[in-house]
Image (tube, rainbow, N blue to C red):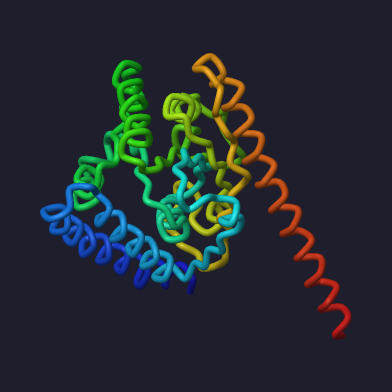
Amino acid sequence: MSFLRSLLFSTPLIAAATVMMGLGSMIASLFDRSGNGQHRMAQIWGRMLLGASFIRVRAEGLEKLDPRAHYVFVANHASYMDIPALLARLPYQFRFFAKKGLYRIPFLGWHLKRAGHLPVDRSNARHSLKSMSAGARIVAERGVSVLLFPEGGRTPVGLRDFKEGAAYIAIKAGVPVAPVALVGLRELLPMGSIHLRSGRAILRVGEPIPTAGLKASDREELTQRVQEEIRRMLLGAEEEKEEEIERQKAKGKGQK
């Protein structure tokens, strides 16, 4: 039943929402070249996708962020639902780095380009460095945060080693890195699956890591620190989940 709901209800609604909001983003771009209006529409799109999928995402740790500040957000990447969750629950203007191939997808690619998101060509080191430098300029000159998935793509289990691009941008722009752990979305839409499961997930924000006084040569150490913080948050969430399961089991036994 869950698979039929996903196939016959959620998937068509997601496609319709993407087309509708993609067209809306194109129209908005004719009047707003800052990309801010398009981002607000993308936030609505993210909420629409979560609603159509019957996925509830709870945001934790937002109070650790200064609403007047700008950040390099760094998140783990395990599911196609990560981006809708981040757009829907992270109340910041941000631009993210997307694989170059996504820009060829109708509606999605049009939005990415017109909203000011940055393409990354991982097969070309020179082009990749150019994108990182552009990201640093966006943060420093335009006052807009950026978001990266430093694993370089979705992962079926655990975490891959983080690439150093996020640390490079944060150090060059002189802004903090904000670690973000996405918990539970992998189980709701696993890598390689088209079965969208309903359920709950968590977007957990860690303590921002300052970069004042750091040099480009410190990016490896900063990258490792960010990865360890995200790993710690993910492990903590798993322990909390197991404790909740045990509490539910104990509660069930007590009612018998």
Residue 213 position by quadrant: top right
Q: In this view, does 110 lie above or below 25?
A: above
Q: Which of 85 and 91 is in front in this view?
A: 91
Residue 143 position by quadrant: top left
Q: In this view, does 84 lie above or below 226?
A: below
Q: Which of 20 and 16 is in front in this view?
A: 20
Q: Which of 196 and 221 is in front in this view?
A: 221
Count of picture labels: 0
Q: Which residue is drawn at 52% across and 68% down?
A: 56
Q: Which residue is drawn at 38% across and 64% down?
A: 49
Q: Which residue is drawn at 37% across and 33% down?
A: 140
Q: Which residue is drawn at 60% across and 34% down?
A: 226
Give the quadrant of the C terminus: bottom right
Q: Which of 192 and 176 is in front in this view?
A: 176
What x and y, as percent, mark residue 253?
86, 78
What x and y, as percent, mark residue 25?
20, 57
- Is residue 238 toward the left or the right of residue 43 in the image? right
What x and y, as percent, mark residue 2?
49, 71
- Is residue 110 toward the left or the right of residue 61 in the image? left
**Residue pushed farthest bottom?**
256
Residue 184 seen in the current view: no
Residue 67 seen in the current view: yes
Q: In this view, does 216 lie above or below 62?
A: above
Residue 249 position by quadrant: bottom right
What x and y, as percent, mark residue 42?
31, 57
